[in-house]
Image: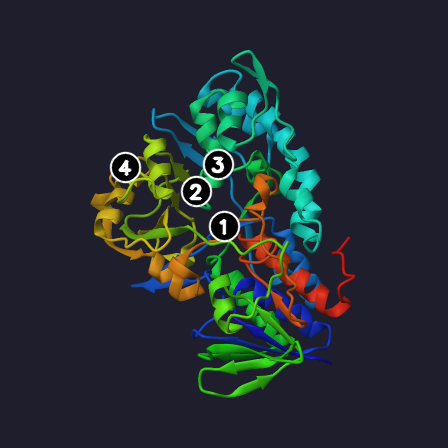
Amino acid sequence: MARIAVIGAGMGALASAARLAVAGHRVAVYERTQTYGGAVRRFQRDGFSFDTGPALLPLPAVYRDLFVKTGKEPLEACVELVQVDPSVRHVFPDGTRAALPNASRAGVVAALDEALGPGAGQRWGDFLVRAREAWDRTRRPLLEEPLWPNWQVLAEREPYPAVPHKRLLRTRRAATLAEIGAWELRDPRLAALLESHALAYGLDPRETPASAAVLPYMEHAFGTWYVRGGLRELARAVYERCVARKVEFRFGAEVTGVLEKDGRVAGVELADGTVAEADFVVAGVAPAALHRLTRGTAVRGDGEVPAQRGTASRLTVLLALRGGQPEGTAHRTVVHTPDRESELDALSGRTPGPVAHPTVSVLRPDDPALVPDPGHEAVTLSTVVPAGSQADERHAEYVIAAAERAIPGVRDRLLWHEIRTPDDVAEATGAEGGAVPAPALAAAGGRLLHPSNSTRVEGLFTVGGWAHPGGGLPHAGMSGALVAGLIVEGPEFRGSR
């Protein structure tokens, strides 16, 4: 039985802690804040309750597997999962609206044909077939296996089978999401639908590799799920599973250093000066924090995937509304910007200041647990902003104005609103500027891959969104599984099959 210190109580860290405890190890989690879940937080006021981080669960099989492997009670016995249908409603700048059924290719094709015109659905359906091929080629190395030592293969090879396109007497293939939209989908509304999946992580579709086609494919193939009571309930269930497996938690315990002895980790040092000895250390922190904890010791060697520096964060506006939710309201609506180039330029830092017409995600869960009574509604608005940006009421007004296209008369119903800024994300996660990591993606020279879970320091492992396989709830859960496998089985571990 090994002593294992886990730094941070984010979802990836919790997933690794539960699995390691079941394997017979003595696991202690040290969390600098007073609660668990990382970015998966909740805000409550006047009987209203809101998710302030992720609010929907794609690929729930990752957490089903975690609960199967760590106890007798399955995930569905601990939380209530509800499939969201329609999966999403899109509101485009020209006023067109399209509601897409959950996990139904035929239904999506029919819905897009009806909303956007004949042929639109078929083009999107054909795109999904190609996206599935990219998924099949990258699923194991980018989600289910430790990062390959020869990761350059993933960096150089584009898995998306783009359709040949004649341009200026030359035949070219789409290398970015923007080119897929322009050359294969051939409709600005379909292009906006596609690009919204990259934009959700702050990725510029003009530069994001075509391999990002796996993001809409995952939503299509595995559906979109809501956890009754809010996604914070999933974090609670994972935390309680850890406690049931005898994981020790120390909240308000800031780790200030990772201790080494003879080239191997020996434990962690806390802000109060105490030392906790450990045979393994699992760090669920952002790269800059890990650098501080190791006091400048290089944990990555030459030729390894370098740590990413997050550039995008999230601005969230929470609305408490009078009046119950109208019948037929979509759980999620994406309101697309009428000025795509300006939004992307602002996010990339090419132009300063807030975006006057941002793309906004509108979440309106039909859940009595979130409101004081049926005569009220809790709505969450979110948009991507540059990491470290100082959001204020002007930003919130732009977001609310965009949401009016999805919720007519929203200002007349507004009781109050709260703003959650990149500073709040930073406080919850410890990531510099409140940066939000993206999932690992192939191609693009490897700039969207994440560092391996193992490090040059023997016994030190990294977990969570800033390590392989990157950000997003499914990826965080898989990072926990990979770290547990590497510790329990050793370097020969090659993932579950």
Which residue is disc 4 drawn over? 408
- Mark 2–mark 1 CB contact (< 8 Å): yes
Report helix, strand or loop for mark 4. loop
Which residue is disc 1 drawn over? 56
Badge 2 crowding class, 10 Å Cα cut-off, few under 14, some 14 to 19, many 20 or more, is: many
Q: Position of residue 308 (x, y in %)?
A: 51, 53
Gap between marks 3 and 2, in whole Å? 27 Å
Q: Give above or below for 87 relative to 239.
A: above
492 sits left or right of 232 in the view: right
**Mark 4 vs mark 3: which is more N-terminal?**
3
User: Which marked residue is nearer to the observer: mark 3 or mark 2?
Assistant: 3
Q: Residue at x 64, y 39 (%)?
A: 156
Which residue is disc 2 drawn over? 332
Q: Give above or below for 33 relative to 170.
A: below
Most foreground residue, 307 or 296: 296
Which residue is disc 3 drawn over? 207
Gap between marks 2 and 1, in whole Å? 9 Å
- Mark 4–mark 3 CB contact (< 8 Å): no
Amino acid at pointer 2 = Arg
Q: Residue at x 58, y 53 (%)?
A: 450
Q: Give above or below for 63 relative to 100.
A: below
Gap between marks 4 and 2, in whole Å? 15 Å
Q: Quadrant of the N terminus?
A: bottom right
Report helix, strand or loop for mark 1. loop
**Mark 4 vs mark 2: which is more N-terminal?**
2
Amino acid at pointer 4 = Pro
Amino acid at pointer 3 = Glu
Q: Position of residue 425 (x, y in %)?
A: 39, 60
Q: Position of residue 240 (x, y in %)?
A: 57, 71
Gap between marks 1 and 3, in whole Å? 26 Å
